[in-house]
Image (spheres, rainbow, N blue to C red):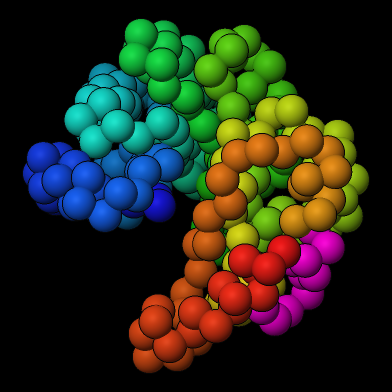
Amino acid sequence: MECHFPYEYPAADIDNALKHSGLPMIGLNTALGPEGAFGLAAIAGQEEQARSLIDQAIQYAKDINAKHINVVAGLTGKLGSTVTPYIDNLQYACEQAAVLNKTIMIEPLNPRAVPDYHFSTVEQAVDIIKQVGASNMKLMFDFFHAQVVQGDLETLIGRHVEHFAHVQISAVHDRGEPDKGEINYPYMLAVLEKYGYQGYIGAEYKPRGDSVEAGLSWLDQFRRL
């Protein structure tokens, strides 16, 4: 499972729940920062605060045995400047995470969902990863964001799957359960397998019905795959 922003709960409580359920925690995000922010890691002048959020996330990941930490960049499109501390902050994150055998991830977000986010394409993410130059620096590939911005998903996977640490799925365009919409997930899951992806696939969606449980029938088909 994933838990994007667990910080309002004591790590010990989450850890106990995981042990009771037998489920692993795949990953979490750095906190978003003050109200109106969407991450601080790429925001000039916020380096100290950004690294504090990175430290917090890595420590929490250690405490609950989560493997991946997604470092949220921020809304640099509002600032009118191309100079950011993102690479330096990611290098710092990778150094701290490597000591604990954790992976740092980044995720391109589509501008319809998150206007002004620091980057939106897989190619931009891969360029950032190469600039950071750390073996524990990887990409979170979200089908929803990739389809909205770029499409041609099989080509994206074939070219860049070596950088994937985690994959997320949901429907396009309503971001509901992954059983409707533009993306043929039975086909795309076979594409992931064809190109050698062996990590987890997380269902990150907004239920169409009144509850998560009401919409879980899609899981039966996916389990058969």
Q: Is residue 79 magenta?
A: no
Say which residue appears at 59% left-offset and 12% top-offset: 135
**Viewer-nearest residue: 185 or 175:** 185
Say which residue appears at 83% left-offset and 50% top-offset: 191
The image quarter containing residue 139 is top right
> Where, quadrant-wise, is the C terminus in this rendering?
bottom right
Say which residue appears at 30% left-offset and 32% top-offset: 65
Q: Residue 76's spot in the image, x, y percent?
A: 51, 39
- Measured along the vertical axis of the image, is residue 83 above or below residue 206? above
Q: Residue 116's spot in the image, x, y percent?
A: 55, 50
Q: Which residues are magenta?
A: 179-188
- Measured along the vertical axis of the image, is residue 65 above or below residue 94? below
Say which residue appears at 56% left-offset and 21% top-offset: 137
Q: Is residue 185 magenta?
A: yes
**Viewer-nearest residue: 186 or 154:** 186
- Measured along the vertical axis of the image, is residue 77 above or below residue 98? below
Specify whether residue 177 is in view: yes
Specify whether residue 32 is in view: no
Q: Residue 213's spot in the image, x, y percent?
A: 39, 82
- Measured along the vertical axis of the image, is residue 175 above or below residue 152? below
